[in-house]
Image (cartoon, coloured by chain):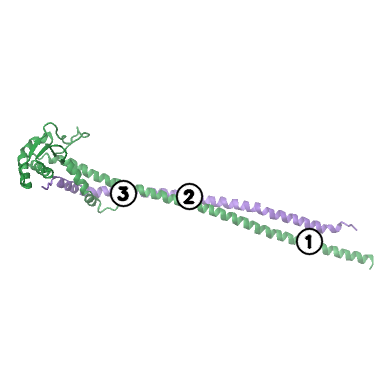
Chain colours: A green, B purple
Amino acid sequence: MNDADVSKQIQQMVRFIRQEAEEKANEISVSAEEEFNIEKLQLVEAEKKKIRQEYERKERQVEIRKKIEYSMQLNASRIKVLQAQDDVISSMKEAASKELLNVSHHHDDHVYRNLLKDLIVQCLLRLKEPSVLLRCRKDDLHLVENVLDSAAQEYAEKANVDPPEIIVDNQVYLPPGLTHQNSHDLYCSGGVVLASRDGKIVCENTLDARLDVVFRKKLPEIRKQLFGQIVA
Amino acid sequence: MDPFKGQGGIQMLLIAEQEAQHIVSNAKDEAEREATEYRSHIEEEYQKSISENTGSSGSNVKRLEEETNAKIKNLKKSTSKVSSEVVDMLLKYVTNIKT
């Protein structure tokens, strides 16, 4: 084998090695590109997943906050309607209270006088005492004195007892009726208060006290009458 | 003949390896950049939906307020029709004495 052949063979081997190296370098490059894409994709997807979860959580919180706010507003709205209902009911009582003043103005047709007598009889029946103390408004004193005997007699017949002794308090009177002048003071629209002599048992039968009792007792009925047709 | 001539292939491989490492290490930076872009896009969408929601919740509040006021108006209107009956009923019970 001469030098030329040897040189030729070496050149061939060098070319082969270089080609192998180029192919290997190419493989490394392609492999690196693939690895880059896989690595990047994994990192991006992992980060995107984290971001999505974070914003989903944020949106859920916003949604919850919205629901809470709406619920509070709905509640406030219901309270507003209930408050309006309460105001209407209160205005009914106020209107009735003002109307009560007209009851005691029926002096002419004896309506109020008969009412006073019935109120006294009712108190006597509740107290069942042989001797009682009576208080009334100063304006009603003469009317009360007019009906005392007939009231005592009526009670005696109904309770089947002797007529009781009724002492009218001439020192302390019930407050006068409601006017613009005394709108902030105590007032009484009429009626009577009876008590046992020792003051332990009291029967408050003023028109205002009766209105309070009736109002409390009839409140469900009043509500039904006023709001039965309305859905709050 | 140059004894170092054959080392060109090895050099080529070394360079290829270095470049490969550089490419792979770039993956993290590229991923971060893409993730940042994605985050800003999502944030933009989120802010947009929030501002839309604020508008709609504002109109909900207004609607609820209008409904409430209408209910109260209706309530006052319908109760005014029966108010005198209620007052009469109360007065009847006050002045009707059972003995």
Closer to us: A171 or A114 = A171
Few, some or many residues within 10 Å of mark 2 (<14, 14–19, 20+): some
Can residue A18 be seen here? The reply is yes
Q: Is residue B6 left or right of residue A46?
A: right
Q: Secondary structure at mark 1?
A: helix
Residue B12 pos. (x, y %): 79, 57
Few, some or many residues within 10 Å of mark 3 (<14, 14–19, 20+): few
Q: Secondary structure at mark 3?
A: helix
Q: Residue at x 36, y 49 (%)?
A: A75
Q: Are marks 1 and 3 in contact (CB under 8 Å)?
A: no
Residue B50 is marked as 2
Eyeballing the image, is A211 above or below B6? above
Q: Is residue B24 left or right of residue A14?
A: left
**Furthest-top residue in this view:** A171
- Image mark 3: chain: B
The amino acid pointed to by label 2 is Ile
Residue A144 pos. (x, y %): 8, 38
Per the image, the residue denoted by label 1 is A22
The quarter in which the N terminus of chain B is drawn is bottom right
Eyeballing the image, is B61 above or below A176? below
Residue A101 pos. (x, y %): 15, 39
Residue B70 is marked as 3
Q: Are marks 3 and 2 in contact (CB under 8 Å)?
A: no
Q: Secondary structure at mark 2?
A: helix
Residue A120 pos. (x, y %): 10, 42
